[in-house]
Every structure is written in C-alpha cells, then in structure tokens.
Amino acid sequence: MNSTILSTGIRILIPLFLLFSLFLLFRGHNAPGGGFVGGLVASIGFALYAINYGAERARRRFYLRPLKLIAWGLLIAVLSGIIPLIAGETFMTGLWYDEISIPLLGKPGTPILFDIGVYLLVAGTILGIIFSLWEE
C-alpha cells in the first residue's frame, strides 16, 4: 500500500505502541493490564508497518520471527511455574523476592515473569497470524 500519511505516522506510532505495551505489561500484576493486553498492543505497531510496507519487509526491518517469540514466551511462562516447584511450593505459586523493590514496579517475582512470557507468546502469535494472512 505504501501510504505517505501512514509511513509518517508509523515512525511515531511504533515507539509509542511499544512504550504503552510495556506500561501495560508491568502494570498488569497490580492493576488491569498484563502480558496479554501488552502483547496485543505491541503487535499493533508491527501490524501497521506490515500493512504499509508488506510482511517480508517488516520481518527484515525488525528481525521478527514469530515462532521464536512464541517459543521464548512459552519457555519463560513454564519457567515461572517451575521455580516454585524447585522452592518446594506447588506449580504456579507466586513467589516474590522481598529483598528488592523496584520503583513503580514493586517487588520482582514469578507473576511478572509469567506476564513477560504471556506478552511474548501473544505478540508472536498475533504477528504470525498477521504475517501469514498478509503473505497470502
């Protein structure tokens, strides 16, 4: 399609979508948001780029491999469930590291690790769907 208006807007929108998606991701374990919504918002920016320039150019430009995002997301999400097993708790029990408190984020723990896994998984799935539909 290669619209001049969309091309100009994409330069501003992609970083804004990514920042907003990270905001939703890290806000999600304490308030509405989280990995699912953050992954959807992140994939919107790349979808706009693919709509304007084509899926192949979007893959080359951002080094996006949806299957790798899905694999990393699943690995991180499963790891967040295995960590409590190693600590002697049940699978997917939330554990927090009380020694550190990160400003605006709170205490790091397995719930945010799970959200990061879901974020990558959702972003990879949506991008895979968008790229495969666009290439057809």
Image (spheres, rainbow, N blue to C red):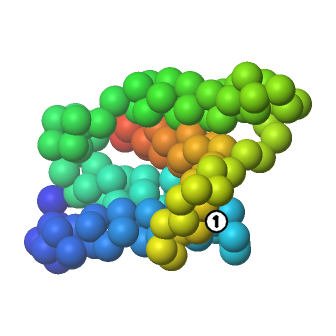
The image quadrant of residue 24 is: bottom right
Frontmost residue, 88 versus 41: 88
Frontmost residue, 90 versus 135: 90
Q: Is residue 69 left or right of residue 85?
A: left
- Which of the image's four quarters has the N terminus? bottom left
Residue at left offset 26%, top offset 56%: 49
| Percent x, y of residue 78 | 66, 28
Say which element carries label 1.
loop
| Percent x, y of residue 57 | 17, 40
Residue 131's place in the image compared with 109, above or below, is: above
Q: Please name the amino acid that badge 1 sits on.
A: Gly
Residue at left offset 21%, top offset 43%: 62
Residue at left offset 22%, top offset 35%: 63
Q: Is residue 115 left or right of residue 7?
A: right
Frontmost residue, 31 versus 105: 105
Frontmost residue, 38 versus 129: 38
| Residue that mark 1 sits on | 28
Residue at the farthest front position: 99
- Which of the image's four quarters has the C terminus? top left
| Percent x, y of residue 80 | 66, 35
| Percent x, y of residue 31 | 70, 74
Residue at left offset 21%, top offset 74%: 12
Q: Is residue 17 left or right of residue 109?
A: left
Residue 133 shows up from this direction: no
Residue at the farthest right position: 90
